[in-house]
Structure formats: C-alpha cells, structure tokens
Amino acid sequence: MEPDGGREPGLSPAEPGLWQRVVEQLGTAVVVIDPAGRIAAVNPAAERLLGRTAAAMQGQDLHDLCHRDPGGARIPREHCPLLRALAEGRPACGDDDSCLRGDGRQIPVSWSATPLTRDGVPQGMAVLIGGTADDRGAHRERAERAARTTALEGLAERLTLVADITEVLGQTLELDEALARLSRLLVPRFADWAAVDLRIGSRQVHRVAVTGPEGRDAGQEDWHGHLPVPAGEAARSALVQVLNGGGPVVQDRAGPDDTPPDSPLAAVHAAFLEATGAVSVITVPLGTGRQVSGALTLVRTDPARPFGTGDLEVASDIGRRVGLVVDNARRYGRQREVAEAMQRNLLPPLPEHGRVRLAAGYQPAPAGSQVGGDWYDAFTLRDGTLALVIGDVVGHDLTAAAGMAQLHGILRSLAWDHSGPTGAVVDRLDDAMHAITTVSMATLVLARLEGPPDTGPWTLHWTSAGHPPPLLLTADGTAQYLEAGQGLLLGTRLGARGRRPSAAHALPPGSTLLLYTDGLIESPGSDLDTGLGRLRRHALALAHEPLDILCDRLPARMPPGSTDDIALLALRLPET
C-alpha cells in the first residue's frame, strides 16, 4: 500500500466485511501493527485480554505499551523478538512473556506474529496473544495456537489479495488490461485456474479470459462467438444460475459429473472444468443484484486444498469489485466513442488546392473520454490563397470543444476576405474572443500560403499566438523550426498596447510543412527542447513518405504517456 497523506505505509485498520465477520468473532486476541510497530487495529478479544479499549490503543507502540519480560520488566527494543521479526518481515512466536494490562496487572502470555505483505513488501504484522495454559493443557494449547496461526495467515493473504486487486483494478479503465491484471493476481495466489464470462446484451455471454498455471489456457477451441444464456430458474449449471442473477456458488467435484449439460453454455463450461481437472470450484457474479455483468469462475485442482467459506466471501467481494470495473469500462468506452465521433465531426474536410497536397490527423487523449480543444483547419481565402490553422483551446471537456468550434467559425469569417498581415487577423480574433465565445485562453498558428498552387514560387506568411513553431522539412533532408512570428497566446487582449508580429519564409519545391499541437511534443519526464528534437528526428525519417502515412505514423513514434490530444496538419509542395 502506498503512503497516504504522510502516513507510513502499512495495513489499513480493516477490510470491513472480512474483519467484522472473521477477526472480530475470534476468541483469541488479535492485534494488527504497522511497519513501525504501532497498533492499527484490535479485535474485542484483545480489548478484554489487554484491559484497554481499541480507541485507547490505536496508534500506540505495542512493545512500549504492554510487552514485558516474565518478571514484568521492560524488554530493550533491540532485544525484542517481535520487533526483530517485524523488521525482517518473518513469522515469530514467544511462550514466556508477560503483558501489562490497562489496570496495571501483569499477566503471562504467549504470542504468535505473522507478516502481512503486499507484492512481497512487508505491510505490518498480525499478532495473536493468548494467556498461557497449564501443563496438562499445554499440548492442546499449542495445537490450537498453530491452527489459529494457520487460519490467520490465510486470512492475511486473502485481505492482502483483495487490497491488491482493488489497487490494480483502479489503475485502468481499459477492460482487457483490467482482466489481464486480475488474472495475474488470482492465479496462482488464490486459484489454479480463473475464467471470466461477460454478458453481451441481455441474453448472450462470451468467455473473454481463461488463465491457468504459467499463463496456460484450457484449450477452449470449441468456444465460438457468443453463446445464449438459457433462462429459467431450473438450470443446473452454477455458471448459468449466476449469470441469471443467482448468488455465489462453491462446488466440490470429488468425481466425474455424469449429469448431462442442459444447455450449450453449460456444456462448454463443463468441458472447461473437466479439462482443468477441477476438484473445487467457485462461481461468483460480477456486480451486484440485478446489475450482473458476468461471472468469475475460480478452480482449484488439489484435493487437499478445497475452497472454504472464507474463500467464497473473498471471491464474492472480488466479483463485486470487478463488476464495477466492467460497468465503468463499458460506460467509458461508449462515452469515448461518442466523444471521438463528436470531435472528428467538428474537424473540417481538407480542400483541394492545385498540386499542393494536404493531410491531417487527430488523436484523442488516451486517458480521457471527453472531447478536447485541439483542432486544425485549411480553407481557401477570397483571393485564392490557402489558409492553414492549428489551434489548442485550454481544457479537455465539452466546454473546450464548444469553444474550439466557436473560434473555428469566427477565425474563418475574419480571415476570409482579409489580405493583410496574419497578425492583424489574430489580433481581431483576440479582441472578439471574450465577447462572443466561451474561450478564456487558446493558442494557434494562422498561416497563409501565397503563390501559384501548381508552379510556385511559394511564400508562407504566418503568426503564432503562443503555439509551438511550424516545422519545415526540405527535399534535401534538412529540418528547421520557423520560430519567427511569435506573439502572446489568445486571451491576453492586447488592445492598443501591442500587436502580434507576422513573419514570412520562402518554401522550396518539394518541401513539407508540419503544424501540430503540443500533445505531439510533450511527454512525462521530458522537457520541451527534448520533445522538439525528437519530433525533428522522426519527421525527417518520414519526410519521403506519403502525407497520410506521415500523419499516421508520426504520433505512433513519439513516446507514450502523453495525456493531451494531438492534432496534426501537413502540407507538401509539388516538385518543380
């Protein structure tokens, strides 16, 4: 568990359901301590034995509070076997110590400590404390203590598993990745095989994941497409019952099942269990109540290790958590599809302009389902010249998308019949933006290509409002950023205080011009200069590819991890 709010890493006080139903009902005192030896949780038996309330013990150092030697003296911390075991992350026990109760009495105790780990990292310890038995009952006490220790170790592992699964499932909304992570945690820590079935629509199911030892599958070659889920409460198959809204089921398969399957779905599932050699099976719903999105089947193949009641509770808890992930992932997928369709519909088709070639690309932010404010545009002006625009509105939501659409329309209107400097058009847009749009800030490059579209010569005139500079690739293999024409981003409302500059640059025949948004050059852990250098190298490597291929492959060559949209507009001039 990662540190939270400045606390040292350790076990949280409880996984409420399992703690209340298992630990609190134990007649043996259980104390959970964090990596520093502080008390994180106690059960009622510990309160009675130690003569202190849980509230009074919370956060106290267990060793200093009550651990004493047989004579009642404090044990030096460096000599304490419990603290040594805590530091080394190993089990330990003691049969000849005493404990200082809250009422001041010393009582002889024995104790047993079990490490609590997550991914091999110690998270604290669970300590069982009991009063010592007389000689006649010593053997029985030791046997009972060993059984309790074994049970506690199993409980600690199940608690850690649930916490690990909760953590990894919260790290992604991509369903395939979430199920892959789930399988890696369940097998072999909790089961020998795991299978996930998801409902498709109202009456069909598809097995989407099967994981076994060392990643093997169960040879499910006979599972083709979607199979129907039979209706009715009389279905014998546990999988069918669960998919129809039934509760969790645990099955012992001591011998072969001679009962014939009563549906195609039951037949395929029975073949899966037979192929894996299942001797104990748990099937739990994904989700809760009527919101069942599928089923999780867990298989053990060792007759000496069947699933128990505690395992069923853990599997049910995992099923509820996975069901939430499935539902969220599906909602996320639908939202993302709608968002991407909306974003692409807001982006205009590119015009024909003689022998000049144009291509564009748009890639939504990978971590979000909402539309963004990145856009490109190209259109023919009244005087026949070609206008190029790349822009980025602050924000990644519907407001940013709406603002992008507003700027897009206003800029086209302002630029269409204006033959003067591009900086003057951008200034007019800045003056009008606050009055007639919802945009607070934005960046863009407005460029105009002057010259006969088929023969040239060509000159690029442009103005940048706080946007990354255009990249010019020449046919002879050079690349340069056009860094002139830089002005403040939109939203500054320069007014009479200043005007944005315009710049001009001759474009040689066969050259390629790239306009892009900052999502293409920004990546975690990398500065802007590094991103610009990387873009230059990859663009040069693709400079001789067709424009549509360049626009498709260039974003794929940039480092992963960007959380921003990417818009890209490319222009290529004809050879002479």
Image (spheres, rainbow, N blue to C red):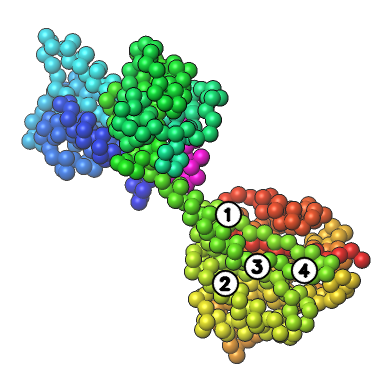
Query: Which residue in the protein does label 3 denote?
Result: 348
Q: Secondary structure at mark 4?
A: loop
Residues at discs 2 and 3 in contact (Cβ within 8 Å): no
In the rendered view, tell whether residue 329 sits above or below residue 298. Answer: below
For disc 4, the marked residue is: 352
Disc 1: CA contacts within 10 A as few (<14), some (14-19) or many (>=20)? some
Q: Gap in Å between the C-alphas at discs 1 and 3? A: 25 Å
Between the C-alphas of marks 4 and 2, the distance is: 22 Å
**In this rendering, which labeled residue sits more in front, label 1 or label 4?**
4
Majority SS type along the magenta span: helix
Q: Earlier in the sequence, mark 4 or mark 2?
A: 4
Q: Which residue is labeled 2 in the image?
A: 405
Could you give the CA–CA distance between mark 2 and mark 3, rounded to whole angstroms? 10 Å
Q: Which mark is residue 562?
A: 1
Which of discs 4 and 2 lies nearer the camera? The answer is 4
Residue count near mark 3 (Cα–Cα under 10 Å), binned few <14, some 14–19, many ≥20: few
Spatial CA distance of label 1 from label 2 is: 24 Å
Front-most of 240 and 40?
Answer: 240
Instruction: Report if residue 183 lies within the magenta region.
Output: yes
Point 74% across, 85% down: residue: 419
User: What is the CA distance from the residue labelled 1 to the residue labelled 4?
Assistant: 32 Å
